[in-house]
Amino acid sequence: MAEPSWQETLRLRLVERNARESSYAPIIEQCRLAQQTKLLKERNASLLRAMGTARPNPSSSTVFVPGTGEDNPVRAAYIASLESQISSLRDELATVYKTQGQNAQRLLAMNETLREKEELSRLDAENLRKARDEIAILRKKVEQHNELMAEKDRTAQILHDEITTLQLELSQVEERNQTLTKDNAKLLQRWLDAKQAEVNRMNEANQFYEELQSRRQTALNKSASTNGDEKSASSTANASGSGNGEERRETGATTTMDGTPSRAETDVNLTPNG
């Protein structure tokens, strides 16, 4: 598994810093050697000066030996040189301690930063895992949504086809309805015409019946006046003629003088329908 980008960046920066600082190491070493050389030269010069100031002992025939007296200048110069070296070494040691402390402080800070970065890396890895899980869930939801949309599209296409079919059927039904309405209007008009004709025939029949009634009434009135005349004439007729006349009245047949039924008899049998 590849390292996180921030760790690689931190490592590269540390390498660059070390390379940048180590690039001056030879110069620093040369400066240190130069300082040590200078100190040694100064110590040698002080020793030479101390040797030059040495004098023979006037109370003896021997040469004065350095370091045998309390006021020996060589010893004093040597001690001063050693003290100078000790002071410089102490300063260098203090600088080293200071640098070591700074390095330790920087190391602690770097460890703390590394710990924080590792914690952030862990949190980022956890968030990345959760994000990937959420992405997988969302992809599944998207696939389900796409399938649902495809199913809805198919259903909508089916409904659209059904609606088109129903619209065609509706147009056909409307055409049939219009045709039936026209046919119904024609049939109604024919029925009304037929009823009007029937009413007209009934009116004609009633008119004809009324005419027949009026004719019958006229005939009855005429026959009544005729019968009154005949009754007055029959009172003077013989007994046989009166007997025959009575038989004809008893049978209820009214005849004329030539033996045919009277018109009043035929008018009574007529109905309003003819």
Image (cartoon, helix red, strand yellow):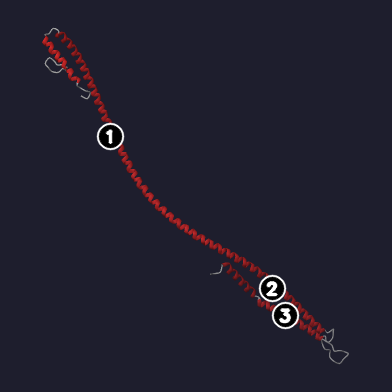
Q: Which-is-in-front pick, marks 3 and 2?
A: 2
**Is residue 230 left or right of 12 when viewed as pictured?**
left
* Three-letter code, disc 2: Gln
Q: Which residue is mark 1?
A: 187
Measured as percent of width and height from the top left, residue 234 is found at: 14, 9
* Three-letter code, disc 3: Gln
Q: Residues within 10 Å of mark 2 (few under 14, many from 20)?
A: few
Circles 1 and 2: CB atoms closer than 8 Å:
no
Q: Secondary structure at mark 3?
A: helix
Q: Secondary structure at mark 1?
A: helix
* Three-letter code, disc 1: Leu
Using the image, tell me which numbered label, if any, was put on residue 36: 3
Q: Secondary structure at mark 2?
A: helix
**How far apart are labels 1 and 2 at the CA level?**
123 Å
Q: Which residue is mark 2?
A: 100
Farthest residue toward the top? 236
Q: Residues within 10 Å of mark 1 (few under 14, many from 20)?
A: few
Measured as percent of width and height from the top left, residue 199 is found at: 26, 26
Circles 3 and 2: CB atoms closer than 8 Å:
no
Measured as percent of width and height from the top left, residue 123 is found at: 58, 63
- Which quadrant holds residue 42? bottom right
**Is residue 169 left or right of 141 when viewed as pictured?**
left
Q: Residue at x 62, y 71 (%)?
A: 14
- Which quadrant holds residue 113? bottom right
Among numbered discs 3 and 2, the one appearing first in the sequence: 3
